[in-house]
Amino acid sequence: MPQYPDIFYNPFAPPTHPVDTVQFADTLRVADSVALDSVVPSFITSGFKGSLIPLPRMSYEVLQGWNLALLGLLLLLIVLNKQLYPRQFRQVLSIPGGVAHTNQLLREWNPQRSFLCMSFMLGYVLLIALFVQKSFVVLSHDAPTYNVMRVFGILCGCMAGWVLLRFAILHLVNWLFDARETVDRQTTVQFSVSIFTLIIMVPLMLLLLYNPSKYFVWAGVGVLGLAAVVRLVIGIIETRVSTKIPAFYIFLYFCALEIAPVATLVTAGWRYFSQGSVF
């Protein structure tokens, strides 16, 4: 018989160490089986006896191709105005810094006749209309109704009418009380705050388009509310400087022009989304 090296297995060689073996019984007593079943759970569990009710998935598409094109045009508008009118751009943004900046701006040029302010107001109307439309989509979860160009056009018309109404009221005040300097200061303040709002709302709109969350909607509402408060405070200061009217009457005037219409619109929107009716 051939000899195998130690490193190979030799099937004919007897084991050098005895192996302990234990005899197993193929059957168990009935009592032991019952005891084991009561301790160890069954391997096969019982089937699912309930019924699955599918829930409708609330999904909607907020971002559309023309949205990014519009935001790109607004960014291009900001860059072009800054490059073409650098001094005027800085002067408009410095209006919240104090009355002296407003005096210097009004001595050099008229914001109501400048391309910079008119183009920014157009961009402001388009951006706010887009924000309101996407807010309707996110809060109502009804994309087929609100996320269409027709709704955007209606909102643009409403925003343009709102802005024109504010300027028309200022010119009416000028015609009634011959307060030309006050009207110029108020329009300059409105231009400045609108440009600041436009610059802040563009990145916020990008976040809202790519992450349609109600938190970004309320953040945008907070920005617009803060802009309204800043415009109110600066407007009162500018009016107090240019006229001798007591501050109390100026505050009442701004309540009728600024606070009351905005509060009415916000209340109507809140009732529409919470109760389904404005009234």
Image (cartoon, grey):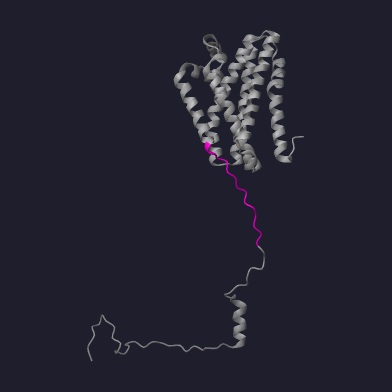
- Nearer to the camera, 16 or 38: 38
Q: Is residue 189 magenta?
A: no
Percent position (x, y) of residue 156? 62, 29
- Nearer to the camera, 97 or 133: 133
Tell me the magenta residue range: 52-65
Main secondary-structure element of the magenta-colored stretch: loop
Percent position (x, y) of residue 67? 54, 35
| In the image, farthest residue toward the top | 178
Q: Is residue 42 above or below residue 216?
A: below
Residue at image x 70%, y 28%?
263
Percent position (x, y) of residue 124? 57, 26
For the N terminus, the quadrant is bottom left
- Nearer to the camera, 163 or 251: 163
For the C terminus, the quadrant is top right
Percent position (x, y) of residue 8? 27, 81
Residue at image x 60%, y 45%?
60
